[in-house]
Image (cartoon, helix red, strand yellow):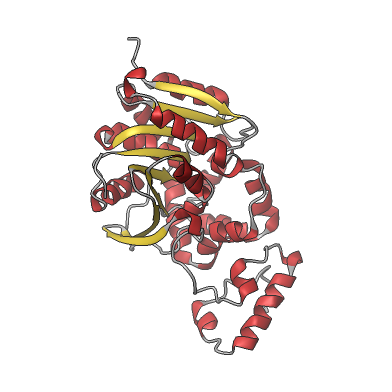
Amino acid sequence: MSSRGSSTPTAWWSSTARRRSSTSAPAHRSAAASRCSSRRRGWPCSSAASSGRSVGEGPDVAISSSLGTEHAVELRAGRLHYRERGAGTPVLLVHGGLANADLWREVVPALAALGPYRLIAPDLPLGSHHEAMRNGADVTPPGIVAILVELLDALDLDRVVVVANDAGGAISQMLAARHPERIDRLVLTSCDQYLQFPPRYLKPVRWVSFLPRVGDLVARSFRFRAVHGPFFRSVARTPLPPEVLDSYLRPMLEDPAIRSDLVRFFRGTRPRHTLEAARGLRTFDRPVLVLWGGSDLWFSRRGGRRLARTLPLGEFDLVAGARTFVPEDAPVELARRVHAFLRDPADQYTSSS
């Protein structure tokens, strides 16, 4: 491996011009306090608001310092932000929709404590990124695969370990099928596969998202606690800290261009992508660990077991008590499993065929 004052339920996503026109620090702090006190409006008190920092300030990448140093790279699709920590075996961490690199905020330090790893956590353009891609950029699933390949090229990484979750798992299956030479080992935690892309509960939402403005309206509905609360409880048994929920939702709620990236990705999710990937994975000759949340409400164990059987060197296991967001519910356990998997000699995984 190579190394290298309205009827809206909250107020903070008002226009950029209005945010930047506020020059009075006391007034700003007063407004922030007012936002934090309005719990009935449905939005948690963010770290930005409680500190008096304006929405436009702060990092353009996932907020968790445990992920390492902030970086950005110019790609054809636009500027991609990522965090990097450590040196050693390169590990690329791939999140899914309505999440960013903060998904790995507890996995990264746990892995860093176990071995010499170069841990790279990008903020992919799946709705929780902090800078929109260029107009016309391909942010469909094949486009995200291309972004990952270009990122590896920019970092001068020939081959990496990939650890993925949720829709990031579908993207990583596509990456492995289309560019098997770029992956040394693959870890897939609860994720889309086969006909479940998007998962069955979201298929009707995808259909209506093609109607004019409906996709944008669905995305903006996540500003309501009645919408985002049940969703995140369904994917993570562990309650998300307010600052992490803020990191996941604030970008697309406040920036129409980021919301557009999310909607275009969601519209581009199709079973043909994962089915095509599954066909390619039948000849993928690298070790693969498929780890499923034992309490996953979105993806069945049967799908995970089938995925592992498709892979010549695949193995399946459960993470007890975890839902879809395994890195949220069992970060230390996930890090331990990944480390043990990477320590096993590759010749242990020999196809019986």
Q: Quadrant of residue 287?
A: top left
Q: Is residue 35 left or right of residue 184?
A: right
Q: Quadrant of residue 187?
A: top left
- Image coordinates for residue 335, horizontal then vertical, percent: 50, 38
- Image coordinates for residue 196, horizontal then vertical, percent: 50, 33
- Quadrant where the C terminus is found in the figure: top left
Q: Quadrant of residue 328?
A: top right
Tell me which residue sits at (40%, 29%) in the image.
Answer: 343
- Image coordinates for residue 318, horizontal then vertical, percent: 56, 27
Tell me which residue sits at (37%, 21%) in the image.
Answer: 313
- Image coordinates for residue 39, horizontal then vertical, percent: 74, 66
Q: Nearer the viewer, residue 236 or 112?
A: 112
Farthest residue to the top: give it.
Answer: 353
Tell me which residue sits at (49%, 74%) in the image.
Answer: 57
**Above/below status of 10 relative to 310:** below
Number of numbered markers = 0
Q: Is residue 40 left or right of residue 70?
A: right
Q: Nearer the viewer, residue 58 or 308?
A: 58
Q: Nearer the viewer, residue 142 or 50?
A: 50
Farthest residue to the bottom: give it.
Answer: 24
Residue 119 makes an appearance in the image: yes
- Quadrant where the N terminus is found in the figure: top left
**Above/below status of 212 relative to 329:** below
Residue 96 makes an appearance in the image: no
Q: Is residue 141 left or right of residue 57?
A: left
